[in-house]
Amino acid sequence: MNKEVSTPNRYAVVGNPVSHSLSPRIHQAFARQARIDLSYEAIELPEAGFAKGIENLQSQEFKGLNVTVPFKQQAWLLCDRKSPRANDARAVNTLILLSDGTIAGDNTDGVGLTRDLVNNHRALIKRRKVLVLGAGGAVRGVLPSLLALSPENLTVANRTLEKAEQLAKDFQNIGEVTSCAYDGLGREKFDLIINGTSAGLTHEIPPVPDTVLGVNSICYDMMYNITGNTAFVDWAINRGASSSIDGLGMLVEQAAESFFIWHGVPVDTAEVIASLRGQK
Ligand code: ATR
């Protein structure tokens, strides 16, 4: 092997918009821990130019990419090979750009959520009643991992009932999902309530009734806000939820799994989460 030729170790997150992304900071922190020399950038691709943009990055010898909103489903379609969990979610957030020009895809969002819940927050999912709010791409990405942990039941509530119904149908081979609109939730209480809607982008909360909260309910927002609480976290705190957690830990955990896929090295996520929280 000719050691004088150094192959670039380039990685990036692609999305639109993407300039706010914490992924470069997270991956650079992991790289320092693992003593791996790499670059990791945030690259905005035009909404109508995903495939062309990826081709361009392949020609620049990028080795791996994270994919964020709104390209995860397009990434799934583009991949030559996909992991079972990417196929379950029909969405990809991790691309491996192989030297033969092919692309392999994986989805680490679901494992990011469940590791944050179970490992970092000691939340129980097995035999617990789980309510997921929203039925869009973000929820599709995490449902397989939640179902794999055998909840007592899993209900998806969505503003547009038809989308929740479609989602339940699409996942019926993976596990049982009950679908409803918010006003169809009745008086059932849930142990774990996960906000997977994008309502937080406009500082709104989905119209979920307070009656879903029991004395020990844990609320989890898949969104995060590095400078304060998300609207959903505030909603849960104000109603006395036993825990109210935002999605920063999920972000770091999904990144750690991508890092492991690319570099084969496990990292200490707690250190990175603490450092991001400390920079509020
Ligand atoms: P993402 O990729 O972030 O999941 P998406 O696929 O557009 O984005 O899905 C957004 C989800 O947030 C949907 O479930 C949407 O509800 P509808 O299907 O009824 O549109 C939900 N959502 C967005 N804004 C909301 C709001 N203000 N209140 C309740 N639900 C909201």
Image: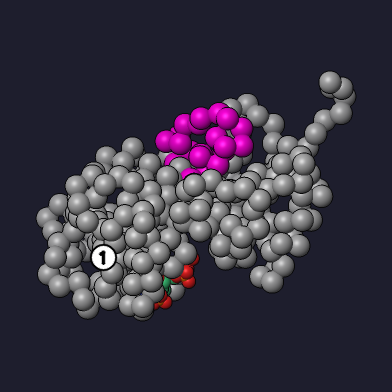
User: Residue at point 39% right, 52% down?
Assistant: 144
Q: Could you tell me residue 110's position as x and y percent?
A: 42, 49
User: Residue at point 66% right, 51% down?
Assistant: 80
Q: Which residues are magenta?
A: 254-273
Asked whether, in this view, residue 176 is left or right of residue 267, the answer is left
In this rendered view, identify the residue nearer to me: 238 or 50.
50
Q: Is residue 256 magenta?
A: yes
Which colouring convention does the figure follow? one colour
Asked whether, in this view, residue 87 is left or right of residue 195, the answer is right
Q: Is residue 232 visible?
A: no
In this rendered view, identify the residue nearer to me: 78 or 134.
78
Q: Is residue 188 visible?
A: yes
Query: Is the residue indicated by label 1 positioned so its CB lies within 8 Å of ligand 1?
Result: no
Q: Could you tell me residue 177's position as x and y percent?
A: 29, 61
- Above or below, 153 relative to 3: below
Find ligand 1 in the image and state its quadrant: bottom left
Q: Residues within 10 Å of mark 1 (few under 14, many from 20)?
A: some
User: Residue at point 76% right, 46% down?
Assistant: 101
- Above or below, 119 relative to 224: above
SS for dot 1: strand
Q: Could you tell me residue 166's position as x and y percent?
A: 38, 71
Q: Could you tell me residue 147's position as x and y percent?
A: 32, 51
Task: Give the amino acid type for the residue marked by disc 1 in the picture.
Answer: Thr
Quadrant for the N terminus in the image:
top right
- Above or below, 224 relative to 63: below
